[in-house]
Image (cartoon, grey):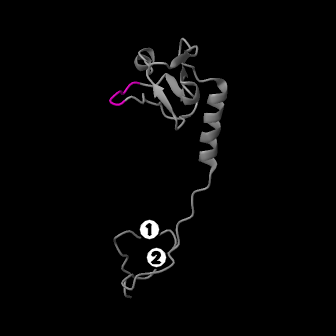
């Protein structure tokens, strides 16, 4: 599930509800429901900008049927989300990075499980 897409018009912060695509070879602008994925050569528009769309002289606007209400998550979406959470929870923790080279001023490499940040561990000399 992706983030909510915003209108492509500058300074507009509304959620996108429609996708605009230009077919230059046919001088046509196609305005339809919001595409599943953001495409590089199309524009996402909010309801206000989709309604007030104008095109250059000689161009045709093809308006596809828009859904009356936004789509609600279905059982497949919820199952996919639950599976993703289960998979993330069962994944093993990443192994700590091993140091390959030490700077000349570094002290001894710490024992396993000891975290070294900007502080050094000083061992008792006895």
Q: Residue at x 66, y 25 (%)?
A: 75
Query: For mark 1, what is the residue?
Result: 115
Tag 2 secondary structure: loop
Magenta region includes residue 12 = yes
The quadrant the N terminus occupies is top right
Spatial distance from mark 2 to mark 1, Cα to Cα?
Answer: 7 Å
The quadrant the C terminus occupies is bottom left
Residue 110 circle label? 2
Residue 125 vs residue 76: left or right?
left
Q: Residue at x 43, y 29 (%)?
A: 6
Q: In this picture, which residue range is highlighted in magenta?
A: 10-14
Closer to the chain start, of discs 2 and 1, is 2
Residue 110 vs residue 78: left or right?
left
> Mark 2–mark 1 contact, CB under 8 Å?
yes
Tag 1 secondary structure: loop
**Residue sticking out furthest to the front:** 58
């Amino acid at each position: 599930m992706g983030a909510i897409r915003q209108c492509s018009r500058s300074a507009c912060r509304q959620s996108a509800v429609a996708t605009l695509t230009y077919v230059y070879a046919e001088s046509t602008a196609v305005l339809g429901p919001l595409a599943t994925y953001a495409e590089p050569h199309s524009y996402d528009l909010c309801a206000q900008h989709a309604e007030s769309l104008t095109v250059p002289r000689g161009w045709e606007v093809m308006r596809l049927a828009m859904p009356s209400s936004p789509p609600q998550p279905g059982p497949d979406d919820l199952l996919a989300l639950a599976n993703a959470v289960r998979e993330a929870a069962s994944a093993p923790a990443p192994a700590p990075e091993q140091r390959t080279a030490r700077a000349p001023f570094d002290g001894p490499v710490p024992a396993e499980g000891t975290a070294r940040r900007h502080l050094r561990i000083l061992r008792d000399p006895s």
